[in-house]
Amino acid sequence: MVNLPDHLYEDYSKLKLTSPNSYASSSSAPPPLPGLTIVPNPTAHMIFEWVYDLHKPNSFESDFALHNLAYQRNNFDFLPRLLWETPGTAYIMLQKIIEVYRHIVGHISLPFSPYLNPHRVYDVLLLFQRMAYHPDTKGHFLKAKMPNYFYSLMDIGVTDKPYEHMRLGALGVIAHMIKASEDGAATRFLMDTSAVSHCVKPIEFGSTDSKTLAVFILHKIMSTDEGLQYCCVLADRFFVIDELLKKLLHHLSYMARPSPALFRLLVGCYSKLSKKPRVREGLRRYPPTLLFDGTFARLIAEDQVTENYWKQLVENMENINNEAPKTLLSMK
């Protein structure tokens, strides 16, 4: 995921990028188109041929090339630049994304066309993930405002598997982009384009993998001073984020095996939000009770990063005055 499980993240702060083999065997990946096979050890010449074959619309050659390029995307370092700089290739890939738009109408989705196989769209999204992350193309990707094309897929408000695969792939593009950004440009772009609002549907309707990616994006935005201020400057925006995080805590509390990666991100978000004095006031009045009543005691104790974030959250909330509420200390 973000090129899809093995486990989504081992160290979420570093956004584990798994191998193409992990993606191919992942239960999160949609089924391949009939007849498509993987070439195990392609040559560089074959990669060039496959990029050329992408220009053969509605053909088996195009689907075969797309599928193999997606599978081999991490094995050829020149591939992202080749895709970006070959005239018309990025446009052809975008067309496969844009074709989906007419099948998405607000909260209601029309029947999914057999021609719009989710694997075809997902393969395109995997290649865009590489372009969003690669040092030779990430700047061009952002300058071209490419993330705008993926927000509609993130906003899908249904749980059907074909749409979930596309939502997951689109989230992966944004996650790769913000992971690769070293100067804060990606975070500023996401703020300018209201990316936080596009994380709502994945959290409400997405699988655990989609929820985790959406919260990863929120966490990365909050990891910069500018992004944290953006999340807290308006009360309405903070309460939307707080409500989403509380919904996720509630969701995790009913899982037999709650996701440690998702929980780690949630605690990390609250830890960062609690740095702001006004937010601390809000959290004292309307605390995320499930974090302090022992519900997740085992998850907190089993992961050092999560425990550190939880302790920082408690410490920040105690800073409002000298007396901490008993609910915060009940796990001590």
Image (cartoon, grey):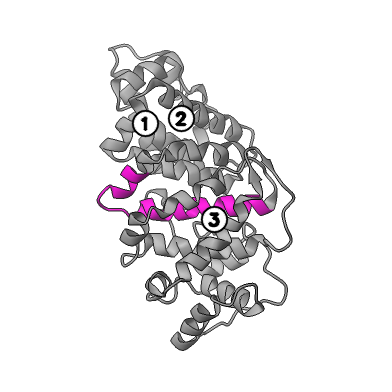
Whether residue 186 appears in magenta in the rendering, the answer is yes
Whole-percent x, y for residue 277 in the image: 29, 20
Whole-number angstrom distance, CA of label 2 to CA of label 1: 8 Å
Whole-number angstrom distance, CA of label 1 to CA of label 3: 25 Å
Nearest the viewer among 122 and 327 is 122
The image shows residue 132, relative to residue 218, as above or below, that is below
Q: Amino acid at mark 2?
A: Ile
Rendered residue at 59%/67% (across/down): 24
Whole-percent x, y for residue 35 in the image: 71, 77
Task: Kindly state the secondary structure of the residue where label 3 is placed.
Answer: helix
Crowd band around label 1 with a 10 angstrom C-alpha radius: few (<14), some (14–19), many (20+): many
Nearest the viewer among 43 and 52 is 52
Whether residue 174 appears in magenta in the rendering, the answer is yes
Q: Which residue is mark 2?
A: 241
Q: Which residue is mark 1?
A: 231
- Label 2 with label 1: CB-CB less than 8 Å: yes
Tell me the number on the disc at residue 265. none
Whole-number angstrom distance, CA of label 2 to CA of label 3: 22 Å
Q: Which residue is mark 3?
A: 169
The disc, 2 or 3, on the residue closer to the chain's N-terminal end is 3
Rendered residue at 31%/43% (across/down): 188
- Label 2 with label 3: CB-CB less than 8 Å: no
